[in-house]
Image (cartoon, rainbow, N blue to C red):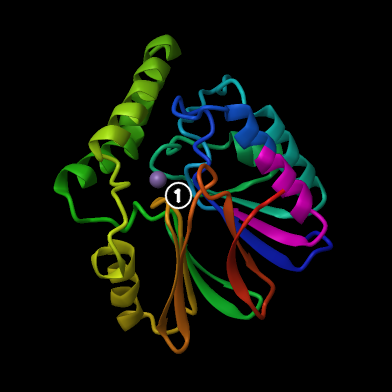
Amino acid sequence: MGKGNKIYFISDAHLGARFHRDPRAIENKLVRWLDSIKEDAAALYLLGDMFDYWYEYKYVVPKGHVRFLGKLAELSDKGIEIHFFIGNHDIWMFDYLEKEIGAIIHREPITVDLLGKRFFLAHGDEVDNRSLAFRFIRSLFRNKFCQWLYAGIHPRWSFGFAMGWSLSSRKSGLDREDKYEGEASEYLVAFSKDYLQTHPDINFFIFGHRHVMLDLQLTHTSRMLIGGDWMQFFSYIEWDGTTLFLDQFEG
Ligand SMILES: [Mn+2]
């Protein structure tokens, strides 16, 4: 562990996405934020879709993101735990980040005790079981055999396809990042309430994926937060063992 005692959560920078007008500005701001937390952080949870597309081959990784990855390596070398959740855009993280920067990769939601409270952490798409088509695509993307087949396609084709897919799925709503229409119609709120019935010991639910900032008291011992994103909000969640809050980085 690092010297710090705080725990931080962010998600959804979608680094490398074609829809960013100034991609370097987004990455630089992220690096400035990481610099601002490195003295007091014990752990950092990246809750998915930090990359808009990621596929690592046996000997090759995607271009770019060097400032971000370098800064993560620095934090990791200081003893700060780096947790990477795969999102629905960067599903194909295998062991590169684990080997290179000591990151802990999470492919499923986790329940973890942090500074005395119980957290349920997830990107958010994993608990979305509303659409059969979406569930099918998700299982295809996560299937080992399909991943092996995909790895055999030359990146000239697969990367081009993926970047286009990201743009078009965003437009069509296929990746379920639909508009926020209030708590009552928010599936992550419904999921959390439902999950609490069988797991009343969860104090905090934290999600990414939805690109909205939400902080909602569910019961007197449980809250759920959706952490915004690092595209429009530059938002993060901070936990020091006493207070948990959602804020936006101004630096
Ligand atoms: Mn997502």
Q: Is residue 114 left or right of residue 178?
A: right
Name the quadrant containing residue 87.
top left
Q: Is residue 126 left or right of residue 223?
A: left
* Spot occupied by residue 59 in the image (x, y as percentages of width and height): 58, 20
Q: Is residue 124 above or below residue 244?
A: above
Q: Could you tell me which residue is drawn at 45 percent across and 37 percent down?
A: 90
Locate ligand 1 by image quadrant. Answer: top left
Q: Which residues are magenta?
A: 29-45
* Spot occupied by residue 31 in the image (x, y as percentages of width and height): 71, 41
Q: Could you tell me which residue is drawn at 51 percent across and 52 percent down?
A: 47
Q: Is residue 152 visible?
A: no
Whether residue 136 is in magenta: the answer is no
Residue placed most toward the observer, 190 or 127? 190
Q: Is residue 180 left or right of residue 68?
A: left
Name the quadrant containing residue 189.
bottom left
| Residue type beneath disc 1 | Arg
* Spot occupied by residue 233 in the image (x, y as percentages of width and height): 53, 50
Q: Which residue is mark 1?
A: 107
Q: How many marks?
A: 1
Residue placed most toward the observer, 166 or 111? 166
Query: Where, quadrant-wise, is the N terminus in this rendering?
Result: bottom right
Whether residue 40 is in magenta: the answer is yes
Looking at the image, the residue that sits furthest to the bottom is 220
Q: Could you tell me which residue is drawn at 78 percent across and 47 percent down?
A: 35
Q: Is residue 107 above or below residue 58?
A: below
